[in-house]
Amino acid sequence: MDLIADKIFDKINFTQSRFEKGEYEMCVFRNCDFSNCDISASKFIECEFSDCNLSLAITNDCIFRDIKFTGCKLMGVLFYTCRNFGFSAVFTNCNLSHSSFYQKKIKGTKIKNSRLEAVDFTECDLTNSVFDNCDFLNAAFDRTILEKTDFRSSYNYSINPETNKIKKAKFSLSGIAGLLHRYDIEIDRN
């Protein structure tokens, strides 16, 4: 596998030109289209993806270590197929809807201003993660570790405290309904 380091990839449509599997270190991908591409077994270390489309990309055995995703579409990405060891990424202004982090250990993850509609966090470890202004409409949390996780500025989540570990997690008063939803009670905001 070739090592590609310190290279900038700008406006490349990998759906039309073949993506070369390899080890990418400290590379920048700007306005690139990886949608439906097979990037399996590739390594991305300390790379930045800016305004890229990775929707439905095939990520089997892929390594994402110290990655920054900014303004990216990552819809339907099965992150659970990526290698667990060293997996770390920061997501800012991204759309991760319909993606899955099933059983992923991603402690300390930071996601800001992002759409997480119908994302699967089942059996995921999100300890010490920060979700800043994120939309969790229909996201799945089941047997998820959310200890010390910050949801204070996020919304539309529905988390069952009986089936998830939420010790010392942070929630805003306005988001408390997302913890009580399953009890079918009415909360008066007055």
Image: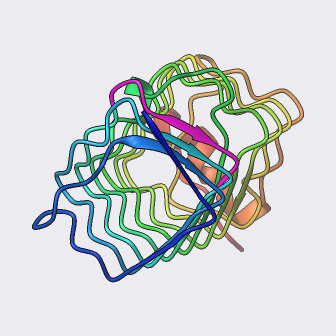
Would residue 157 be found to the left or right of residue 15 on screen?
Answer: right
Q: In x, y percent, where is residue 27?
A: 58, 63
- Expressed as whole percent of the image width and height from the top left, the position of residue 127 reads 78, 31
Residue toward you, 30 or 24: 24
Magenta segment range? 60-67
Q: Residue 64 magenta-drawn?
A: yes
For the C terminus, the quadrant is: bottom right
Q: Quadrant of residue 15?
A: bottom left
Colouring chosen for the image of the structure: rainbow
Q: Quadrant of residue 77 in the image?
A: top left
Residue 13 location (% of width, % of height): 21, 73
Residue that appears at 55% across and 68% down: 7
Q: Quadrant of the N terminus?
A: top left
Could you say which is closer to the camera, residue 101 or residue 59? 59
Instruction: Judge by depth and name the residue closer to the eye, 40 or 180.
Output: 40
Residue drawn at 75 percent across, 33 percent down:
107
